[in-house]
Amino acid sequence: MFQFTRLGRAKQLGIGLTVVLAATLTVACGGSTATPASTSAAGTGTGTPAAAKATATPAAAAAGKPVEPANKADLAKLKGDIIIDGSSTVYPVTAAAAEEFRKHAKDVRISVGVSGTGGGFKKFCAGETAIQDASRPIDPAEVAACQAKGIEYIEVPVAFDGLAVVINPKNTWAACMTKAELKKLWEPEAQGKITRWNQIRPSFPDQPIKLYGPGTDSGTFDYFTQAINGKEKASRGDFQASEDDNVLVQGVSGDTNALGYFGLAYYTENKAKLQLAKVDDKGDGKCIEPSIETVKNGSYQPLSRPIFIYVKKSEAANPAVKAFVEFYLSKSFTPLVQTREVGYIALEDKTYTAIAKRFATGTVGTLFPKGAEVGATLDRYN
Amino acid sequence: MAVDVRPLPGADLFDQRLSYRKKQGNILMVMGVASILIGLGVLAILVVDILIRGLPWIDAQFFTSFDSRFAANAGVKAAVAGTAYMMFFTILVALPLGVMAALYLEEYAPDHWITSFIQINISNLAGVPSIVYGLLGLTVFVRFLELGRSVLAGSFTMALLVLPIIVVATQEALRAVPSGVRDASYGVGATKWQTIWHHVLPHALPGILTGNILAASRAIGETAPLITIGALTFVPFVPNSPLDRFTVLPIQIFNWTSKPQTEFHALAAAAIVILLAVLLLMNSLAIVLRNRAVRRRAG
C-alpha cells in the first residue's frame, strides 16, 4: 500500500523535474558553447555580471545620443494600458521602445507579446491589441480580416532588418555567393540533389554541404524563401532547422562545410565564430556584405527588409498610445535602434520624420497593397 | 522398498554452472548502477553548469527589476509575481475541485460502467500533452468567457492541466486510509458525511496535500499552454488584479535563451536556479508531509 503511494509520488516528482530539466537543457546546450564568444566577439567581456553592469550605460550612448523628449511633463502625467503583440523579430525594438518610454511615463503599462506576425494580426484584426508588431507588411487576407471587423490601422515602419548568410570561419571558398547560387542551393528542387559544394560552383571543393536555417514558422524563413527562391515557404526540407537562432549559430560555427542564414543581430553577437558570405544580387560581380550602411542604403539585396508596427486607428487617439508611437519615431528613441542591445538598423532620419507626420495626420491603410515585397525600400513614405 | 532414483522431471533443463549464474546477476547489477550513474551524472553536470553560470547574476537587483534589454538591469520581478499570482489561483480552483471529485469517485460513486469510464478518462487526461490544455484555455477562457490574457485565464487553464493529477493522487490517498477506520466510525453510528469529514479526510490529508504540491510543481514549470493562450513576454509591471496581464518564470527563461546576446543566456540560467529552488522547496515539502503521515500511521 505504501509502496503504491510511493511509486505514484515518484512518478509525479519525475513530471515536475522533467519540465525544469528540459528548460535546464535548453540553456545548458544553447549557452555552453556561446560563452567564449561573450569575451572574444563582444570584446567588452560582458559575460560576467560585473563587467556587464560596468558597461551598461556607456554602451547605450556609444551609437548616437538619444535626446530628451520635449514633452517630459506631459509624459509623466500619462496613464493607461497599451497591449502590443506580434512578431518576435520586431519584439526587441518594441520592447526597447517600451522600456525607454516608461522611464518618462511610469504609469503607462505597456506589455509586449510574441505571437508571430501572422498570429499577432489575427488578434489585432479581432480588436484584441492596440499595436501589432510585424516583420512584413500586412497581407491582403489580413487587410480583409481587419476590414470585416471595422479595424482601421496606421502603418508605421520602424527599422530595417538584414538577413545574414553565414559560413564557417574556416571556409575559404564561399566568401561571395550570387542570388542564383543561393537559389540553386535552397530551392525545393535541390532537396537530396545538391549535397556537395562543387555542385553549386565547380570551383568550390568537392565537400559535403551542411545547411542550417530557421524553422518554417518563422518570418525569417518566409522572407528568405520569398527573396531567394521566389516563393514564400518554398524551400528544400533537408536542412537542420531550429526556431532558436543560437542553435544555428552553434551548428555553423562547428562545421567547416556548413552554411546557414538568420537575422544579422545573431551574426553581430557571434562574429568570432562565423564568417559572412557576401551576396551578389544580380550576378554581376558586385558582392555586398550586410552592414548597417548597406542595409540602410538598400544596396544589400535581396536580403534586407523593413519591419513595422501597425497602430489601431481608434487607439491612436488614446493619449498614451499616441505618445508612445510618437516617442518610438522620435530622436529620443531612434538613435538606440542600432545599439548592440537592440541590434537592428535605423531608418533615415527624414523617413522617420515623414512617417511620424503620416501618423500625426492619421493616414490609414497600407502602402504595400500586395503584401511582402522583395527588396522593398521606404521611399514611398517620403 | 526400492528407492526411486530417477531425476525429477525437468532436472535436465537445470544448468548447474553456479558461478556463471552469479556472474549474470553481477552483470545486471553493474548495468543497473551504470544506468543510475548516467542519469545522475547528466543531471549533476546540468545543475552544476546552471549554477556556475547563473549564481553570479542572482542579487537583490535581480529580484526587484523588470525585464530590460541590458542584462545588468534585467530581473525577474514581473515573472516571479506572475508565477506566484497564477499559482495561487490555480490551487484555489484545482484543490477543491480535485478533492471533491476524488471524494465522490472513491466514497460515493456506485461501482458500475459509468464510474469506470470516468476513471479511465481521468487517468488518460493526466497524460494529455499540455499544449492541448492551452488550446482549450484559449477557446474557453480567453475567447468564450472573454477573460483575455489575464492571470485568471492562465490559472484556469493550469487548473485544468493539474486536475487529473490531483484527482488521482487524492484517490490514492483515500484508498490508503485503512478500512478499519471507516468501519469503526460506522460502527459507532456515524453517518457517511461524519465518517468522511472526521476520519477519512484527516487521515488522507497529508497524502492529498502531497499530491497537490506535486501538481503545483508541474504547473509552475509549464510554458506551452501559457504561450498558447497568448502569454506575454515583456511585462514591466506586477499584475494588480486577477484580470491583469502577466508573465511567468518559464516564459521569461524561454525569452532570454533565444536572445542573441550571450549574457542573457547566463541570465536565463539564473532564472532557472530560482525556478529549480522553488520546485525543490515544494517537492521537499511534499516529502516532509508524506513522511509525517507515514510516521503517524505507524505510531
Image (cartoon, rainbow, N blue to C red):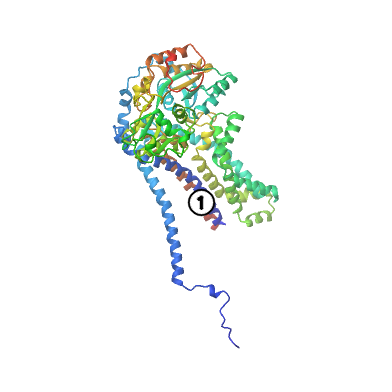
Furthest toward the front, the residue is A202
User: Number of callouts in the render?
Assistant: 1
In this view of the protein, can residue A107 be seen by the observer? no
Vertical placement of residue A293 versus B12, above or below: above
* Residue B117 in the figure: left or right of residue A368: right
Tell me the quarter of the image containing the N terminus of chain B. bottom right
Location of residue B156 by image quarter: top right
Packing grade of label 1 (10 A; few <14, some 14-19, many >=20) is few
Q: What element carries label 1?
A: helix
Given residues B165 and B94, the one toward you in this image is B165
Residue A11's spot in the image, x, y percent?
52, 50
Residue B97's spot in the image, x, y percent?
61, 41
Residue A220's spot in the image, x, y percent?
45, 29
Furthest toward the top, the residue is A361
In this view of the protein, can residue A312 be seen by the observer? yes
Which amino acid type is shown beneath numbered disc 1?
A: Ala
Given residues A322 and B238, the one toward you in this image is A322
Q: Which residue is drawn at 51% across and 32% down?
A: B231
Given residues B113 and A121, the one toward you in this image is A121
* Residue A323 in the figure: left or right of residue B115: left
Residue B278's spot in the image, x, y percent?
45, 42
Q: Name the residue under label 1.
A: A10
